[in-house]
Amino acid sequence: MIRGDFVVRLFFAAVLVWGTTAATNCRAGGLAPEIVVSVADQELALIARGKVLKRFPISTSKFGTGDAVGSYRTPLGETYVSAKIGDGLPLGAVIKNRNATGEIVKPDAPGRDTIVSRVIWLRGMDGTTANTRERCIYIHGTAEEKRIGRQASFGCVRMRSKDVIALYSLVHIGTHVRISAKPLHDFLPPEEPSLLARAD
């Protein structure tokens, strides 16, 4: 005869497995919004149900890709949003050590290379991103907006202030973030042919 406590443990184990599988299938099916960062395109897309909701130019590391501590490289792999910092801050508000300093800088202010407006702090989900949170890898606003669109950061994913504020409002703690060397189109389903398309 099976003991009651064993049955209870077996039941909760089954629930845990089911929940994990359901979450994985939900993400794989595109039901939950996710962020895809393309190092190749220097672009970031917010994708849900196989559709691009938003697409922004970005800047990843000028030192290339990797996750070694002290490398100043952008990690490749699976991560998720672990913290959001900057609720309600004005555009250009300087953030240092994840706190607003009270200073506001204009885009491309001479001699200023600061984190501004919003911070989306990432945490790694696999071996290739294990050091991501410890390294303080963020998606964040930058004062050096003229460098957006090319590799210029020290490991983080930089965005224009207006863009990171828009993205910040659309994601939540736990949102999946995939950072890849591949172009964005590799993560999108092929477009369905139009009903009006000619057969010839």
Image (cartoon, rainbow, N blue to C red):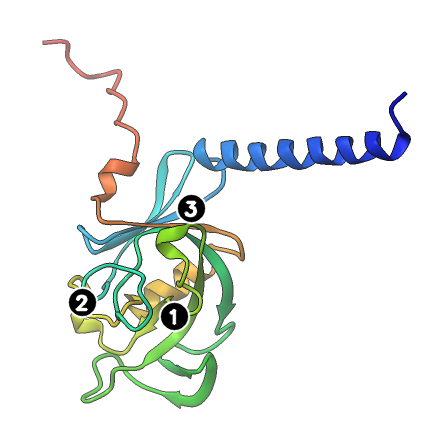
Q: Earlier in the sequence, mark 3 or mark 2?
A: 3
Q: Which of the numbered marks, if any, corresponds to residue 79?
A: none
Farthest-out residue, front: 1
CA separation, marks 1 and 3? Answer: 22 Å
Amino acid at the residue labelled 3: Glu
Tell me where residue 31 appears, x and y as whole percent: 49, 35
Label 1 sits on a secondary structure element that is loop
Q: Determine whether, in the image, residue 39 is placed left or right of residue 21.
A: left
* Residue picked out by circle 1: 135
CA separation, marks 3 and 2? Answer: 26 Å
Tell me where residue 21 appears, x and y as whole percent: 56, 32
Tell me the quarter of the picture where residue 67 sits: bottom left
Crowding around mark 3 (Cα neighbors within 10 Å: few <14, some 14 to 19, many 20+) is many
Farthest-out residue, left: 200
Instruction: Name the residue at 67% across, 37% down.
Output: 16
Amino acid at the residue labelled 1: Arg
Camera-side residue of 35 and 162: 35
* Residue picked out by circle 2: 63
Instruction: Name the residue at 52% across, 56% down.
Output: 172
* Residue picked out by circle 3: 34
Label 2 sits on a secondary structure element that is loop
Crowding around mark 2 (Cα neighbors within 10 Å: few <14, some 14 to 19, many 20+) is some
